[in-house]
Image (spheres, coloured by chain):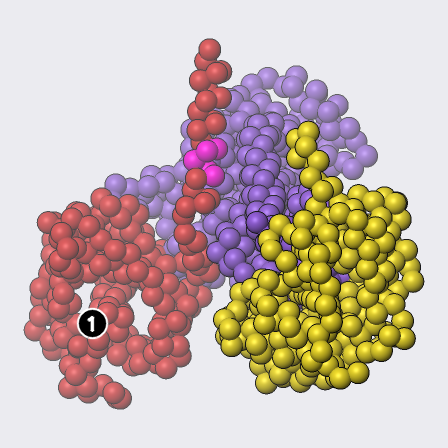
Amino acid sequence: MINIFQVAYKNLLRKKARSALTIVGIALAAWVLVSLLGFNRGYEMSLNRDIDNLGFQILVTAKGCPYEAATLMLKGGTGLRYMKADVVAQISKEPEVDEITPMLMQAVFDPNKGESGGYSAYLGVDPATFPKMKSFLEFKQGKWFTDPEALEAVMGYEAAELEQREVGDPLLITEKNVEVKVVGILKRTGTQDDGTIFLPLKMVQKTFDKTDDLTGIGIKVKKEASISKLEDKLYQLPDVQVVSMSQVKQTIMTLVSTAKVMVFSIALIAILISVVGVVNTILMSVMERLQEIGILKSMGATAWDIFKLIWLETLILCISGGVIGAFFALGTARLTDVLIRRLLPYAPSGGLVQINPSLVLLTFGIVILIGLLSGVYPSWKAGRVRPLEAIRSQVE
Amino acid sequence: MSQTSPIVLEAHDLVKIFHRGSEDIPAINHVSLSIREGEFVAFVGPSGSGKTTLINILGCLDNPTSGKLSLDGRVVVDEGRVLSESALTKVRRDIFGYIFQKFYLIPTLTVQENVLLPFTFYRKPGADAEVGRILKLLGIDHRKDHLPGEISGGEMQRVAIARALINRPRILLADEPTGNLDTRRSEEIGELLKGLNRREGLTIILVTHNPALANIADRIIELRDGAIYKESWSSNREA
Amino acid sequence: MNSGGADMHKKTRILWLLFLLLVLPARESRGAVGCDLNDPDRDVARLFPGSTGFKTNYVSIDKKGGPALLAQIEDRLGDQFQGLYETIDVPYTLYEVFKGKEKIGYIHGVNEKGQYGGLQVFLALDLNGVIKTFYFQKLTSKYGRELRDSTFGDQFVGLSLKDFYRYDVKTGSTGGDAALEKIKNPVPEAEPDFKAALRATKKNLILVDEFILDNKYLPYHQAAGGTKS
């Protein structure tokens, strides 16, 4: 037996190249759409996670540009400015403060890294407060150091891999010629922590001769307390810069939103083009088959039957294109990630393009809607063909 | 066929006028006729005589300007009042099977699928049971899994006939069914139609300008200028 | 006016993004970290004077031959692969170097655990697997200056895997190989890194032999008393 679905499908097989090209067009549109929606979702998720994984909502640094400070904390880097250690005591007095952790970042030049040397960065952290704030960090080997002056190090996974270090191995802080012992290796987090080498704060201060200096103070605000109120108070402190992570996020999202608008308008154009392509394909095939449609009607097909048949053909094209496009998007998500990363002002770590089932379903929904809409006119036109057309056009 | 068979098609005073600019061209000029169940009627005549226009009106594919047409006792057209398009579709699928000069087979469907195509829209009760018999009757049983591109023109027209018969129509309307075939295949199709009429009792209305084909019908109606010019009964059939 | 220019710049970037999305082929993502040249264009030209281009290939023991291949490589090395990072799935980057259309050699680097950090030992080889250049891309050592000095690396030039078979990577014994005896450790205190450099070199040469030279040097291993084929 045979059903209308098979007839529609086999009709499409009659012009394979044309059907295939139409499907490719829809697939491209679906691909762009899925990737963009995935990016839209993933970027914000990654950014939120990056910020949450900092473990603190407010970062106090020495005066400088706020974005640079954020970048410094997020990425690790150079061009350091210092503030005095007693700021910690001052801030601790504020009632909104839940936890506070001082940090000192140091970078040393290693002439034996690469052809022309390179920087290694170390983050001095307080073993009493830092691990508690970053309790989500997990260890692959070992554990945190406990002595604030110990010659010990905890390494992010990538840093450890680069240096081929395992727990118990010695690690050399090159410029200072100081040897420390690796006591912990963190699991991969997908954040900047992967590339960080953590050392006890006091030891860093001593080694680098910065006994009274800090580069950053992380503050975790009490759950019920107002972050902005605390921020206002922190602004009163001399020579410090207050970076609130929600501000950073805001700023970054604003920067990215311009890009998003552009990209979404391009996606919209891609979709419009594919709609026009579908309408054109189906309309063409209807025009070519006027006589045949007349015959179908003489066989007893109603206008609605013909409408359904042509609509089904449109839907098959759109759904196949949608499926291919969605799979393609899944397959190339990482590549898209890499490319977007290169082009954005600031890209958080972790997957920028997050494609999940509901997103794929949404895209299917959109593609099917496109199919339904773009099929209406050709199907209606086909449904109106009178059986006589078949005979009339053969007479002349 | 006997004179007492019920009348399945009755046309009274059919007129069809085509408007071309300000000129009115009468294509069908006061034609009245009736066809009884089991008859094999051939319409012949020179081109422009109106035979195709007439068969289209009789087959409910076109509407007359005036006149009355009843099919199987149902009035389809009466003085310009026509049934709705959907009602016409119902009449068409109940009464008629159509075949044309071109076969209109879907090239990507097999012979059997092409024959079954009408079922995707409409299935007359009990029609399924006939499928195998119809394929055999038309001698395309052994070709049922082939694609149209793999069979001959004669076979393609047989497929088209099988498709027209699948819903067991009361009347088979054939408009130049051998127009695309060579002499030998035309004869085969002619024999086939004759057989369907004689053995299955199928009413057939045929339009052709091929005298040999027309001669297999038991009633030949010759049209000239849109009117019946001559009507003859062939004697090649015993009563 | 200025902001208009910045907008234009942004637009161009986004158009490029779409262009790249549509045109670039997918790249394989990698789990474990391999050993790439930091700046391949510059580094290949420097390590292989006279070269005009190169092709980058990624090979891992896992994909090439699985555990059986790993066993053979360990046998040839005379030591097990060890630790968190010296694993079967490490992707090795093998650069094929060209002069015009003609292939003139290979560059291949490996990671090796040193005393205070990771070593990255790159070798530029001719088509027969003979060392043309020895290069520490990265070296964390108190004696980095001495080890990275060209007088150290030059000692490896002209050697091939043939010369390393009698070298015992565990003890550092040269096994009496005359060519290897000539390689001197510039600083006695740097012994662990010196040995790591030699182990890295041997490992590097074995991998190249397995990956691209069709085990041309395997007979020397057997002659030197290798345990199996």
Q: Is residue C21 above or below residue B158?
A: above
Region of the chain picked out in magenta, as a range = C14-18
Q: Which residue is mark 1?
A: C213
Q: Colour of chain B?
A: yellow
Q: Can residue A124 be seen here?
A: yes
Near-viewer residue (C39 or C11)? C11
| Hue used for the chain lettered C | red
Of A277 and C65, which appears nearest the observer?
Answer: A277
Mark yes or no: residue A5 visible: no
Percent position of residue A229, x then y: 75, 23
Task: Write the residue at 78% across / 68% down.
Answer: B171
Residue at 21% x, 77% y is C215
x then y, percent, for residue C118: 34, 57
Q: Position of residue C148 (x, y in %)?
A: 20, 51
Residue name at image x 25 percent, y 55 percent = C55
Chain identifier matching the purple colour in the rendered picture: A
Q: Quadrant of residue A217?
A: top right
User: Looking at numbered disc 1 in the image, what kind of residue is underneath it?
Assistant: Leu
Place of residue C97 in the rendered image (x, y in percent of width and height, measured from the top left):
19, 56
